[in-house]
Image (tube, grey):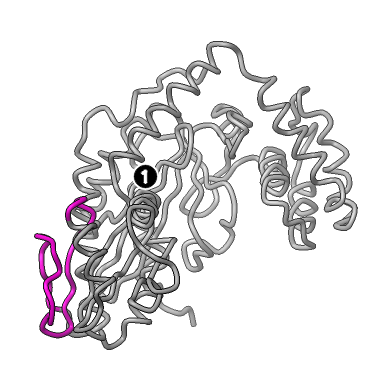
């Protein structure tokens, strides 16, 4: 007997059903065999450039239709962004990563959109890439992540067995054939030894494959992304009075929504110090999906001074009170009474959902990108 689907799995299933009603060309690039029943992490989806241009509107409409919240929109790279949706209580999170070209840090446009999508194949409720394209995609990811293991070579072997006819491998990546052969042979040790050389060649190949026009376009997209990342906060700073029952469980539940975490109390400040340098660090964390808690109490002068500084800088999102404050917190941010971990989760999410709603409402955050180029 099949186990019932989790709220995340049901949401992903309905997302694919909605996506299939649009004219979008897309494919799920990896870890798709057990979807939607098992979602190992985020879901990587390659999409055509025209559809990418309307993602904000599509995701917002889907969330409204399903009565779920969009917690985060995060720009990861050139025409590459993620949306995190929160299911209803008990809260769960679904991260959908979309990209037009496949790119990784320092390597723009490794695999063009038309190559990712041409020949895509139906797989259950969604589409997947051709096995030869996915094979190159898999190997490039391993060169970037530097984590070759037997499960990765087994994946390359399985994809190779599915390839009919001549496998896709552009001339600029002809040197990758040796890596493919080593993976097919299952030689993890040699793959690991040669990874540094392969990563260097991949970065060189990526740059060599770009025209002057493409380089300029990539610079413009990166500038656009940088402005959005500076403007739209993906992190949260809360002042906390008192001990919240179930706080540890709450923070664990929020890990997918906020990837970085910093907990500051009086003892921490005695060791590390505060001031403008720490305020700058907190500001950076708030721009980069960080969750920061600053604990205040009856005898916490350093924490109180830091709270006042952060308040003056406009960095405090809310004040969470498990008990009545015993000292002024020095800012005008909303005060929320929280009696438990779930209350803390809802207070923090409410602020982030409001920020993301503003980010999604901005016009011109994406361009049409109507040319694959």
Observer-nearest of 201 and 337: 337
Question: Residue 338 lies in magenta, yes or no?
Answer: no
Residue for badge 1: 19
Observer-nearest of 81 and 123: 81
Residue 31 seen: yes
104 vs 147, left or right, is left
Magenta region, main secondary structure = loop
Q: Is residue 12 above or below residue 364?
A: below
Q: Is residue 125 above or below residue 248?
A: above
Observer-nearest of 297 and 136: 297
Q: Which residues are magenta?
A: 312-337
Q: Position of residue 361 (x, y in %)?
A: 19, 39
Q: Position of residue 285 (x, y in %)?
A: 38, 54
116 vs 228, left or right, is right
29 vs 63, left or right, is right
Q: Is residue 240 above or below residue 314?
A: below
Residue farthest toward the bottom in the current orientation of the protein: 245
Q: Secondary structure at mark 1?
A: helix
Residue 16 seen: no
Observer-nearest of 177 and 255: 255
Which quadrant of the structure image shows residue 71? bottom left
């Amino acid at each position: 007997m099949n186990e019932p689907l989790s709220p995340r799995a049901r949401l992903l299933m309905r997302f694919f059903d909605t996506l299939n009603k649009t004219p979008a060309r897309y494919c799920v690039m990896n870890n798709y065999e057990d979807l939607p029943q098992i979602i190992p992490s985020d879901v990587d989806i390659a999409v055509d450039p025209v559809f990418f241009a309307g993602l904000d509107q599509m995701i917002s409409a889907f969330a409204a239709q399903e009565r779920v919240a969009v917690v985060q929109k995060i720009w990861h790279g050139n025409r590459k962004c993620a949306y995190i949706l929160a299911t209803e209580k008990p809260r769960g999170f679904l991260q959908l990563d979309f990209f037009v070209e496949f790119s990784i840090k320092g390597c723009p446009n490794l695999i063009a959109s038309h190559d990712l999508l041409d020949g895509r194949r139906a797989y259950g409720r969604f589409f997947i890439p051709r096995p030869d394209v996915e094979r190159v995609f898999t190997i490039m990811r391993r060169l970037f992540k530097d984590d070759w293991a037997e499960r990765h070579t087994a994946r390359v072997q399985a994809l190779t067995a599915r390839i009919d006819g001549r496998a896709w491998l552009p001339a600029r990546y002809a040197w990758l054939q040796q890596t493919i052969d080593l993976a097919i042979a299952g030689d993890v040790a040699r793959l690991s030894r040669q990874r540094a050389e392969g990563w260097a060649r991949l970065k060189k190949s990526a740059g060599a494959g770009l025209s002057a026009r493409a380089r300029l376009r990539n610079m413009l997209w990166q500038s656009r992304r940088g402005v959005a990342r500076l403007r739209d906060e993906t992190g949260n700073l809360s002042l906390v009075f008192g001990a919240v029952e179930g706080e540890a469980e709450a923070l664990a539940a929020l890990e997918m929504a906020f990837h970085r975490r910093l907990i500051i109390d009086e003892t921490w400040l005695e060791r590390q110090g505060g001031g403008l340098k720490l305020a700058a660090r907190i500001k950076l964390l708030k721009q980069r999906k960080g969750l920061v808690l600053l604990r205040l109490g009856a005898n916490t002068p350093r924490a109180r001074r830091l709270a006042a500084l952060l308040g003056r800088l406009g960095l405090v999102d809310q004040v969470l009170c498990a008990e009545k404050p015993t000292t002024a917190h020095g800012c005008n941010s909303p005060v929320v009474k929280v009696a438990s971990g779930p209350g803390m989760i809802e207070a923090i999410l409410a602020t982030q959902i409001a920020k993301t709603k503003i980010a999604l409402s901005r016009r011109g955050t994406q361009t049409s990108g109507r040319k694959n180029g």
